[in-house]
Each structure stands twice: as C-alpha cells, then as structure tokens.
Amino acid sequence: MGLIKKIFIIFTLVMLAGLTVFIIMIKKGKSADVDVVKYYDSLYNITEDYKNGLSEEDIEAKYDCNLILSTDALSQEIVDSIKKRAVVMEFAPEGEIIGRVTWDTEYKSEISKDKKIMTYGIVLWFVIFISVNLAIILIYIFMIKPVKELHVFSEEIAKGNLDIALQRHKNNLFGNFTESFDIMREELRASKEREIEADKQKKELVAELSHDIKTPVATIRTTCEVMMVKYQRKLDELKNYINSMSENTDNGENISNDIKNNAGKINDLVELEKERKDALEKVNLISEKVNVIEKIMSDIFDATMDELDHLEINVREEESGIVETYFRKMTTVKNITIANNIPECLVYMDKLRLEQVFDNVISNSVKYSGTEINVSFDEIEGIANEKGRKDSFIKITIRDKGPGVPEDELPLITEKYYRGSDVKEKDGFGIGLYLVKVYMEKQGGGFEYYNDDGFVVELYLKKV
C-alpha cells in the first residue's frame, strides 16, 4: 500500500499545482483593449449627424450608444455607466459640452465568460481528480494487490511453507490463475507428505534390514571362531601325541623307529599346520569382512535416523601400503593379479569407506565380467585443483576382461539407482558406483571409468 500512497500524494500535489496555475491565469486575464480611434470616429460622426438634425433615438440606434444630454457630469445615468466600465466621451457639437456619449464595452461579458471558464475548469479538475484516484484504487484492488499476494505466496512456497492458503477474491482478474496456484500448492503439499511417508518407510525398511543382517553376520563370526578353535584343538592333540612319544623314547634307535612307525601322524601334523595357516588367512579375511559389514550396518542403522545419503567420512593421513595389503589379501579369495607395488607415501583416506569402494568395484567386475581382475598402481604428479594449485595422486587401476558397459550407458552408471540394460537379471540396487563416486570425492580424490578391452576403473587418492 506504500506505493499507492506515494502515487496518490504525488498526483494530488500535481493536480493542486495545475489548479492553482489555472486560477491565477484566469484572474490575470485582461479584457479586450478599447479602440480609442474607433470611438473618436464614432463621436465625430454623431456630432455631424446631430448638427444635421438627426434625432437622439436615431443616433443611439445608428451608433449603438447612449446619448445623455445633461451638463451634470455626475448625473446618476453617467455614474452608472462609469460603474459598468462603459466608454464615456464628452458631447460638444458647438464647442460647449451639452452632454455625454457612452458605449457599453465587452467587459461584463468577459467577466461572465471568465467565471464560466473557471467554474467548468474546477468541475473538470474534480472529475479528473476523483476519476484518477478511483482508477488507482481499483487497479490496486483488482491488479496490484492480487499480484503482491501471489508474490508473498510464491516466497512462502519457495521457503517450503505449503500450509499457507492463497486467498481468492470475487471478481478478481487473476481468479483462475490464483486458483491454479492454490491447486499447485495443494498438490505440492500432498506430494511432500507422500515423499515424507515414503522416506519414513524406506528408513524403517533399511533399519529393519540392517538389524536383520546383524544376526547372520554374528553367526558368521561365531562360525569362524569355532573353526579356529577346531583346527587349534586338532593341532594341539597331534603336538601332545608327538611330545608324549618323545618322552617315552629312551635312545636314538627307538626315536628313529617311532618316527618310522608314526610317519603318517607326523605328515598329518605338517598337512594340518598348512591347512591351519591357509584356513587362518581365509578366516581372518572373513572376520575382517564381518567387521566391515557390521560397521556398515551400524552406519546405515544410524543414518536412517537422519539421512542415508550423508554418511560420515573421516579422512586421515594413512600409508599407501594399506591399499596394496587389501588387494594382496583379496588374491586369496578372488581371481586378482597385482601388476606392481604401490609407491610408498602418505595419502588421504577413510579406510572403511575406501574398503567399501574397493569391494564395490571388485564385486561389480566379478558379477558382470567373471574374468580375471588386474590391479596396478601409478603415481600422478601435477594435477591442477579448483584453487589453481597442483596436487599429486596415487592412481589405482582396476581392469577386467569382460564385455564392458554399452557406450551410451557409460555416463549414467554413476547415477543413483541406475542399472544397465544388460544386468537386469543380476541382483543389485544400482548404487554401487554412485557410492564409489561420492566416497572418492569426499576423500579428496577422484574416480574415472571407461571401456578398454573390458571395463576399467581408475581411483585417485590424494597424496599428503
């Protein structure tokens, strides 16, 4: 309403100024100037006609004048003529003043005309003033006010306030538009409510699944521990047997005979030790994976209370050898070959998230290619960052020999929930490479992928 007040005040001042100028001009207006020569010519002709005997009435009719034959200069008739702004001239046909000749001027009609002009002007001024102000009020009510309400409404919608209703006014020029906006608000609110409900259900489902997964994970851990105890018990039994055999033997010949007689058990002990070491490596790897799964499930369970897409990343300075150690361990359970040793240095990483990255990439290669996986390491120097400074990275290249990804789908495979057209029959949710990209970027590194006689993934860890 402030703008309307300003317009009203400015318009009123302009109109008042215009009215003042108009009145001043009318007041200063002058009557037509008196043509003295014309009146003297008329007086001369009147004098001649009077001398020639023309009557007083005929003279007045002929020259449109009043002939006052009176020597009294202040007679009432002359005074009245002077009051009316009439032209008064002395009448002396024989040289002696015998009266006055008067002519009525246009002064009276000019005054009347000026009054009419002023009256009409003031009336017109009021008509314009009232009409324009009425138009301003109507424009405000039917046009500006609805637009301002729409503006306020759109700001509230932008803030996420979908509970504010848009008022609908009768005979509003924007009636249909306003109604459409309000319908849009209702639809947005309903959509938001559905989204909140769906998100709630998703989080509840993830929480339930994460809780359910903890049970088999605990079983796997227990099984691993039982296997370790079982191998250790059998190994202890064989060791005790050999020790007891040694204690019951008196001389070298008997020892030799006992060794020959118990060669099978000794071989069993050696084989059992080998099996124990091999099993120990696998069980330790399984235990490590169980720990990772438990930590991930714990994160997911906690994240459902907040937001699944914002899991915590704890980046620290770590030795690059951790990466190679991970892949060396994986060679015992996966068909992985390591081409070279990783350059020794410090890199920025979150060990848990980086292990998730490796697991996702390798799992994808195993699932979709089923071929040997080759891992190589390289050191990349002098890559410019966003601030113009140059950073150095450790590049980890993971390459399989499968069919790769269709070229038209390559830009899409890091999108959340996207799954390729040729993997629909495979289990999965389409978030593996999405998480790889997110986790690598949050660790200050990078992630690239392409086809080259198979599918190739390049992971970049920023050097300290």
Image: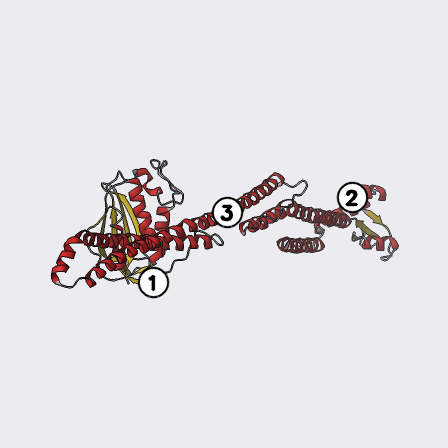
One can see residue 195 in this view: yes
Determine the CA span between mark 1 and mark 3. Answer: 32 Å
> Viewer-proximal residue, 386 or 314?
314
- Residue at 84 percent across and 55 percent down: it is 79
Report the amino acid beneath label 3.
Asp
Rate crowding at label 3 as few (under 14), some (14 to 19) or many (20 or more) other CA atoms within 10 Å: some
> Viewer-proximal residue, 61 or 123?
123
Q: Which residue is tagged 2?
A: 63
Report the amino acid beneath label 2.
Tyr
> Viewer-proximal residue, 111 or 288?
288
Q: Which residue is tagged 1?
A: 316
Are circles 2 and 1 on residues that touch, CB within 8 Å? no
Please, what secondary structure does the residue beneath circle 2 have? helix
Q: Quadrant of residue 318?
A: bottom left
Residue 68 in the image: state x and y as whole percent: 85, 50
Question: Quick one: label 1 or label 3, which is nearer the N terminus?
Answer: 3
- Viewer-nearest of discs 3 and 2: 3
Please, what secondary structure does the residue beneath circle 1 have? strand
Residue 146 in the image: state x and y as whole percent: 62, 46
Determine the CA span between mark 3 and mark 2. Answer: 108 Å
Q: Quadrant of residue 383?
A: bottom left
Determine the CA span between mark 2 and mark 1. Answer: 122 Å
- Identify the disc placed on residue 199: 3
120 left or right, relative to 99: left
Count the numbered circles shown.
Answer: 3
Rate crowding at label 2 as few (under 14), some (14 to 19) or many (20 or more) other CA atoms within 10 Å: some
Please, what secondary structure does the residue beneath circle 3 have? helix
